[in-house]
């Protein structure tokens, strides 16, 4: 699945908050492009960046590598990067690597934007 | 033992392969989470074949009384010449002039991931390509050295779930 142009993916619900909608499936075919897009958004140094994988039904190790690299860059740049993951097949690769204990993972976009758990 | 699936793949058909493998794993009686693991493992092996094994490969699935077994093979990097477009680990950034930052591809990570979810992994690799066989127990806990998985009801959707499984596990040979 192609990663859309950055301007189609990114919106700003509030000043300083940026939401980027990630593809329905993330694998070796689109993770290089996703890497570029995430780094471009992080370079603008929003206060909060939500990587919204709410509609993502699969993510492989290359996709996870991209998210982890982006997270590292976000931390270095003082950006509070949060993840939305809903589908088990998107979450699994993060679980196996224990990444879901390092990066803040939320069940949906409103929870991620408010930074609170809505369980 | 019967072969339930025999499918060729390349970079354009990885998604189709995932869908087919997940459907067959469920049909073989795998619980949902394990079907995800089977799909993830086969995908990672197929992605390796696409990236390093000449761009194409073949996946065969067998179901025995106790296991679901998947074998992913590729013809080796020399089979088709140049690397496959769209599957290369490095790309220049758009606009040019900016130093190229390779995306964080870590060699071997996919195979490590496979070893974490499969009950058995066997790798045969040589100049004529690779053949990786992964097996998943059809009844949880019945593989020697395997762990009985317990599912606990989660009370917070924000808390970490599904910790990496630890314990004795036959690794790569």
Image: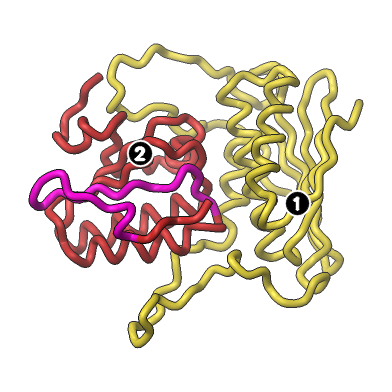
Q: Which mark is residue A100?
A: 2
- Left or right relative to B17: residue B166: left
Does A36 sit above or below residue A116? below
> Which stretch did the figure color magenta?
A6-27
Please tell me whether residue A66 is drawn above or below residue A97 in the rendered image.
Answer: below
Q: x, y (%) of residue A113?
A: 18, 38
Q: Which residue is mark 1?
A: B9
Q: Is residue A59 left or right of residue B128?
A: left
Does the magenta portion include A42? no
Q: Local crowd at mark 2 within 10 Å, few (<14), some, or many (≥20)?
A: many
Q: Report the chain shown in red.
A: A
Query: Dot 1 falls on which chain?
Result: B
Where residue A77 sits: x, y (%)? 18, 63
Give the quarter of the image for residue B48.
bottom right
Would you identify the image quadrant in which residue A4 lies? Answer: bottom left
Which color is chain B depicted in? yellow
B117 horizontally vs A86: left or right? right
Examine the image and state in which quarter residue A115 appears: top left
> How far separated are the C-alphas under marks 2 and 1?
31 Å
């Amino acid at each position: 699945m192609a990663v859309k142009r950055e301007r189609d993916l990114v919106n700003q619900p509030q000043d300083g908050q940026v939401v980027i909608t990630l593809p329905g499936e993330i694998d070796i075919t689109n993770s290089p492009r996703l890497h570029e897009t995430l780094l471009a958004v992080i370079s603008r140094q929003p206060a909060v960046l939500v990587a919204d994988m709410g509609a993502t039904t699969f993510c492989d190790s290359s996709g996870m590598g991209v998210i982890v690299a982006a997270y590292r860059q976000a931390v270095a740049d003082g950006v509070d990067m949060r993840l939305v993951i809903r589908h088990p097949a998107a979450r699994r690769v993060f679980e196996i690597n224990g990444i879901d204990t390092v990066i803040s993972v939320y069940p949906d976009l409103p929870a991620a934007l408010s930074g609170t758990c809505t369980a | 033992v019967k072969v339930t699936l025999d499918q060729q793949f390349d970079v354009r058909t990885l998604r189709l392969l995932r869908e087919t493998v997940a459907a067959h794993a469920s049909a073989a009686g795998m619980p949902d989470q394990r079907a995800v693991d089977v799909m993830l493992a086969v995908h990672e092996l197929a992605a390796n074949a696409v990236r390093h094994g000449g761009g194409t490969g073949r996946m065969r699935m067998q179901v025995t009384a106790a296991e679901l077994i998947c074998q992913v093979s590729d013809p080796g990097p020399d089979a088709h010449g140049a690397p496959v477009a769209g599957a290369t680990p490095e790309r220049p950034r758009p606009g040019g002039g900016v130093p190229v930052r390779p995306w964080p591809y870590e060699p071997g990570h996919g195979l490590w991931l496979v070893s974490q979810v499969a009950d058995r992994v066997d790798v045969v690799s040589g100049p004529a390509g690779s053949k990786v066989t992964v097996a998943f127990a059809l009844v949880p806990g019945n593989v020697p050295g395997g762990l009985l998985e317990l599912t606990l009801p989660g009370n917070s959707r924000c808390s970490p779930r599904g910790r990496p499984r630890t314990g004795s596990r036959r690794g790569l040979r």
